[in-house]
Every structure is written in structure tokens, then in C-alpha cells.
Image (cartoon, rainbow, N blue to C red):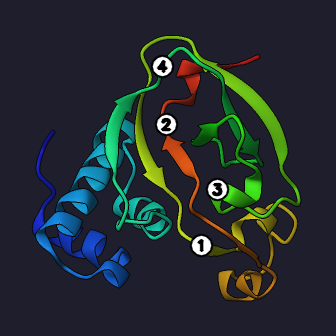
Amino acid sequence: MTEPNQKELQHWMESAAQFGDSDQIQQQIIRAGKFMKELGALQTEEICRYLAMIDFSMSITVVRLPNSVFVQYQEENQNYWYTDIGYSSENVAHASRLRRRLLFTPRAVAPALKLTALDIKDSHSIQGIFTSLSPSVKAKFGQPARGAGTQYLMLKPNLMKEI
């Protein structure tokens, strides 16, 4: 994986600033950012948005999804997050409203970032309803969502098939 440039690195660190700047935290942020940049071809702004939802005090690893069943609490345009069977949408920092519970399994080798979600105010679940509102106004409509659940950020959804 290529190294991020200084400007990218600075933005990544700012996105996860609540965790401090220890070497271990920085390495986890870099690992996650490089994964998103290279495997997902995401731009810095998108990477920072995802980094802000990850609990960097917990382990972050790049894994190959096993041939197993994964749950996705799906909404329009949010199809990168999967979790293990047994977690509710609230356990993985998503508000339960407006989400469909779908089951998936990998079609082939599927690289993913295994992580833990932060507790967040889920305002992204309402994006499709209030498309004309500004992000700051949409944030007021969010509802608390508890993190702590294991998630897999899999940036190649074509490698997953719905079952």
C-alpha cells in the first residue's frame, strides 16, 4: 500500500482526533485510511467521514471475510458496512429506522476492515428523506446510536451476494 501524503495524513488524524496521537492510534488510523484509499478508491473527504465513525481505541485489522453469513442494515447509498449475525442495528451505531436487515455472503475473497463502531448521532439514515436540507439541519434530526459492535467495512460490495 502506498503511503498517504502529508495533507491526507493530517486530515485523517484530525478526523479521529478524539483518540489522541499515540503511535498505536496513529498506526490504526493510517491502516484504515490506506485501506479505504487503495481498496475503495475513496477521496480524502469520504475517508475522513468514515474515520470519524470508527473507535480507534479498539483493534482495527484488515481481514478476508470468511465464507459465512453477514448482516447489512441497509439504506440507499450506504452499502459498505456489514456485521456478524446477532448484532442489532443499534449495536453497530445505526438508528433502526429506515433500514432493512439483509443477509449476505462473500462471492469470492473479500478484503474488509474489521473494526468497532463509535457511539454516534445517526443523522445519515435520514439523508434520502430530507435531500434538500443542509447537513447541519439534517444533523438536528439524528437519533443516538450506540456503537461497540464489530463491523466490517467492505468497499467492494460486488464481492458480496445477498442470500
Rate crowding at label 1 as few (under 14), some (14 to 19) or many (20 or more) other CA atoms within 10 Å: many
Q: Is residue 104 left or right of residue 25?
A: right
In the image, 147 versus 44, the foreground residue is 147
How far, Cα to Cα, is label 4 from label 1? Answer: 27 Å
Q: Nearer the viewer, residue 113 or 140?
A: 113
Image: 2 above or below 108: below
Mark 3 neighbour density, 10 Å: few (under 14) some (14–19) many (20 or more): many
Q: Where is residue 138 shown, x and y percent of the image?
A: 75, 81
Judged from the image, the secondary structure of the residue bearing numbered disc 1 is loop
Give the residue at mark 1. 119
- The three-letter code of the residue at mark 3 reads Val
Pointer 2 local density, CA inside 10 Å: few below 14, some 14–19, many at least 20:
many
Q: Sequence order check: which comes first, mark 3 or mark 1?
A: 3
Quarter-wise, where is residue 143 in the image? bottom right
Q: Which image quadrant: the N terminus?
A: top left
**First along the sequence among labels 3 and 2:** 3
Q: Earlier in the sequence, mark 1 or mark 2?
A: 1
Residue 54: quarter of image = bottom left
Residue at label 3? 92
Tag 1: amino acid: Asp
Residue that badge 4 annotates: 66
Mark 4 touching mark 3, by CB under 8 A?
no
Q: Is residue 96 left or right of residue 160?
A: right
Q: Residue at x 37, y 60 (%)?
A: 58
